[in-house]
Amino acid sequence: MLRVQAVGRVFRRGGHEVEALRDVSFHVEEREFVTLVGPSGCGKSTVLHILGGFEQPSSGAITLGGEPVVRPGRDRGVVFQQPMLYDWWTVERNIAWPVELGGASKREARDRARELIQLVGLDGFETAYPAELSGGMQQRASIARTLALEPKMLLMDEPFGALDAQTRELMQEELTRIAQTSGTTVLFVTHDIYEAVFLGDRVLVMATQPGRVVETVDIDLPRPRTPDAKRSERFLEYHNTLWDLLHDEAEAAQRRRRG
Amino acid sequence: MDATVPRRQAGRRALPLSPAGRSAARRWGALLGAFALWELAARVVDSALMPTLGVIVARLATDASSGLLWQHAQATLVRGFTGLAIGVAIGVALGVAMGLNRVVQYAIEPLLAATYPVPKLALYPFFILLFGFGTASKVALVALECLYPLTYNVYSGVSGLDRRYLWAAQNFGAGPAARAGVLLRGALPALFAGLRIAVPIMLIVIVVTELIGESLGLGFLIRSASTNFEPEGALAVILFLGLLGFLLDRLLLRAARYVVFWQQGIQG
């Protein structure tokens, strides 16, 4: 289980301090799919970077399975908004690398990479270079590369944000399939309410200035979720609840700005 | 990226040539024009001090077939590339350090900014005092001049590299050496951009240093021909230097396309 306790983050910007995160607390159960939704600038990416171990919190504590999280580690697989594939390597080499770094032989790593390429539906593109792939295919390869770590948990930072609408929907469905079959715990950051409801067992709502978690909404929709789920009555209710929450928060933030 | 000449819209006035011919005309037209101007001027002036192209090329052929040109070119290139190699080594090290570490960047940047505009050739007399008339002072000057474009380019390449490339490597558990590999490969396109600026600088600096108190090298060849009142000899070497610079740039471009094949838009 991932436990985030009273995490705060203060930046120093040109002499004065900016409070990016205040008292962020939540947990993610094993095998749970939690989405984190909030307006841009609310610090949701910062939360993910801290959980990834790339940035340090100013206060608070994080544990994964009881172990404190202080630096990057293979137990948390991070998928960024951009694919961040290494352009000078083929798709297969990109995916095999993290397997090799885990101590596998070249041969084992290559076999494992091929399995993962099948899992994300990139068969036939093993020897392609990232620049030869579409944005959606690049992100598939990036997800496969992160899955190669066999992490306890996936941390995903708006991974579908840069994709077109159709590709995004397809990727969402595939991600639910992959998460279910692999039984991986996922924390998924997004600003898209539809995406948050469709993917999540639970949605954490963040507000801005300072960034904090203001609400948790349990999503009681059956799995596996199909595109039809997005048109169900329940889905729209969840969507509207979250929309109202975010809207009220945005108004409150605006009032605070005006003093 | 061969199509460096932008396509004109149809319907515009065009030369009566095939598309390939038109492309070649645009590519080489200015160069041919410059040669034509020289030829015209030489014929009008009609003086031994301003030889025609035919005389210059004939001299170039003579010096090439006698081996004189190669003997001096070799000396020039060995010195030049030695200086360039030193410049690359220091420039990459400085650029990476500046790109990764803000303290280093703050310390080095003002120094670079203040010394970049100083003509390093002005330091040559001082370098001669320091290193003597021989090869060392020339190599040092080439290294110093090449250092700037290389350092600046590698620095901007490293600092411009998305830090998430390195975060991903950290996430996978990559050690310092593997992360350095990611960093250097990410900065390779910038290194090639720096090299394309540094190689002509290398040729300029080494030839200028050879003009002074030297008995070997293309610079010496130019000066000795001039003092012997053989302008065609000096101009033959200058023509050769132009060819050499062009050839080196094309080679570099080829290498860049091969080594950083994923990078679009490396133009020649």
Image (cartoon, helix red, strand yellow):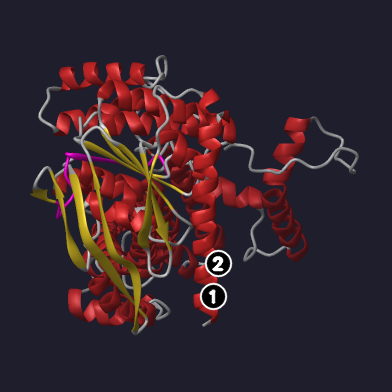
Q: Main secondary structure of the magenta part?
A: loop
Magenta-colored stretch includes residue A73: yes
Q: What residue type is labelled 1?
A: Arg
Q: Which of B177 and A101 is in front in this view?
A: A101
Q: Is residue A199 above or below residue A11?
A: above
The reply to whether dot 1 and dot 2 touch (C-beta < 8 Å) is yes
| A113 relative to B65, above or below | above
Q: Which mark is residue A165?
A: none
Which chain hosts label 2?
A
Q: Could you tell me how far apart the alpha carbons at marks 1 and 2 are, in whole angstroms? A: 6 Å
**Whether residue B242 can be seen here:** yes
Name the foreground residue: A193 vs B152. Answer: A193
Residue at 29% in and 57% down: B88
Q: Name the residue under label 1.
A: A255
Q: Which amino acid does label 2 sit on?
A: Glu
**From the viewer's perspective, is A51 left or right of B197?**
left
**Residue pictured at 20% horizontal, 74% vertical:** B132
Q: Identify the residue at the far bottom of this view.
A: A15
Element carrying mark 1 = helix
Q: Give left or right: position of A168 versus B72.
A: right
Residue range of the region highlighted in magenta in the rendering: A69-84
Within the image, what quadrant is residue B98 found in?
bottom left
| Mark 2, secondary structure of its residue | helix
Residue A187 on image: x %, y %:
31, 42
Return the residue at label 2.
Answer: A251
Residue B264 makes an appearance in the image? no
Residue at point 14%, 50% (across, down):
A63
Residue B237 part of the magenta segment: no
